[in-house]
Amino acid sequence: MPRLSNRAYSLLDKELQRLCEGKPAEQIRRNIVAKRLQKMCEQEGTPATYAEIKDAIDDIFPEFDEKILKQSAKLNLPNPAIRPAKWVIGLTAGVAALAGGLWFVNLPYPMVRWPVSKVAPMLLLPSFMRMDHNYRQTIIYTEQADQLINNATSAADFELGAAKSAQAQKHLDQLPVWFLGYYPQRYCQFFSCGWKFTLDEFQDARALIGRMEAQIFQEQNALQQLDTAALAIETAKEQYQTVEAAAEKTAVLAAWQAGMDQLNEIPNGTLASSQAQKRLEAFQRDYSSLAGTTADVQQSNDLVTVAKNYGIQAAQLVQGPPHLASKWEQAENLWEEAILALNRVPEGSPGYIEAQKIKAQYIVNQGQIETQKLREQEAVATIQKVRDTVIQLIDKAERGEIRGLQAELQKVINNLGTVPADTTVSAEAQQLQTQAQNKLNELQQVRN
């Protein structure tokens, strides 16, 4: 350490500057004293005393302030808190060496610990304490996990049991397998450990934790299966209230039934299985009350399908009109069969509402077909009547009986005008009407 500290030198230099301030001639004396003090700062050794500092200044500046000299000497004393004694350093090194030695002999290696346990077992005190702690924690967490898993009432119990089982496994892994069968008597006399770590005990603990992990895995899978099936059923229940078509209701009921089948597949003996059976009863009751039996649902769907098939055949039969009255009547009969099939859908069944909706449309279609049939029949009857009348008029004309012939021709023309254009005889009606009109024109010219 320097003989004169920086703090002491700074204090002395400030006093020298004060004494020489405004006196250029005094700078020589100041420089001499400053060099002496700087030399003391550069020298290594024991700190300079008050007398040594005074000797370096007093012969050049006898007027130097005594208080400054004493204060600088005090500042030059070493600080014991900053510069520890050698014995402290030695003690620290000894403690570090001892800690390093304890760390080495407590390394988790049989080739290190086992010889030490035979010669100086107390050096393994940290290992004994850690082993005792891990053993106790293994027992505690194993018992807690066993209680939570085997007496679980909810999924939260299994989650907590899984956490406890994982903690037990963690502490079990920290137990030194190389110490199996070893009993630290000295340590247990002082700390009352009261245990003996044996191979059987170690294997039993591992087997128990393994069984609990397998049980937790099975229970969690069963609970997940329960949640999935219940969600599918609840979704089907909501959808059933919104759909109207029989096919859609059947699909919803199939999803509902699939969810109940999943509930039945949950492994017996699990918490999820007992919960599933309770919920399954309610689901089946709702299913029966809403949908009835599967046979009723299928019967309704079959009847609606049959009715639609009749309707398709009827619609295809009358494409590309006009048609004879017999074909219109055949289509009318097909619509009648479709309506009869819809009438057989049981009231209250899933497809009843849709069946009534289709039935209303089919009745309208049947009415339109019946109208077309009547138009065709009336048109044919009109043409037949006109034919007979025309034959009679021709006979009269040939016999020269023209009285009233014009009026009768006009009547024929009017009757032919009533024949609808979308009938099978409309073309013939137009032809006859043209011929009758021409004949009427001839008669009018002759008469004029």
Image (cartoon, rainbow, N blue to C red):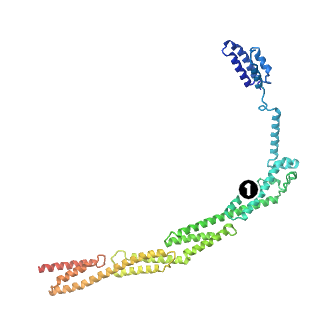
Out of 313 and 375, give the one closest to the viewer: 375
Nearer to me, 21 or 255: 21
Front one among 358 and 430: 358
User: Would you identify the image quadrant in which residue 397 lies?
Assistant: bottom left
Is the N terminus in the top left, top right, bottom left or bottom right quadrant?
Answer: top right
Residue 76: image location, x then y, percent:
77, 25
Q: Is residue 174 above or below residue 421?
A: above
Q: Position of residue 423 (x, y in %)?
A: 31, 78
**Would residue 324 be found to the left or right of residue 288 on screen?**
left
* Mark 1, other Cα within 10 Å: few <14 / some 14–19 / many ≥20: some
- Residue most extreme to the left: 448
Q: Which residue is mark 1?
A: 167
In the rendered image, is residue 167 in sight? yes
Check disc 1 and give the amino acid type: Gln
Image point (85%, 46%), residue name? 123
Residue at the outermost top position: 25
The foreground one among 127 and 280 is 280
Image: 403 above or below 316: below
SS for callout 1: helix
| Residue 430, percent from left and from top | 25, 77
Percent of width and height locating residue 3: 77, 23
- What is the tally of numbered marks visible in this picture? 1
Asked whether, in this view, residue 395 is left or right of residue 157, the answer is left
- The quarter of the picture where residue 199 lies is bottom right
In the rendered structure, the answer to whether residue 310 lies left or right of residue 235 reads: left
Q: Quadrant of the C terminus?
A: bottom left
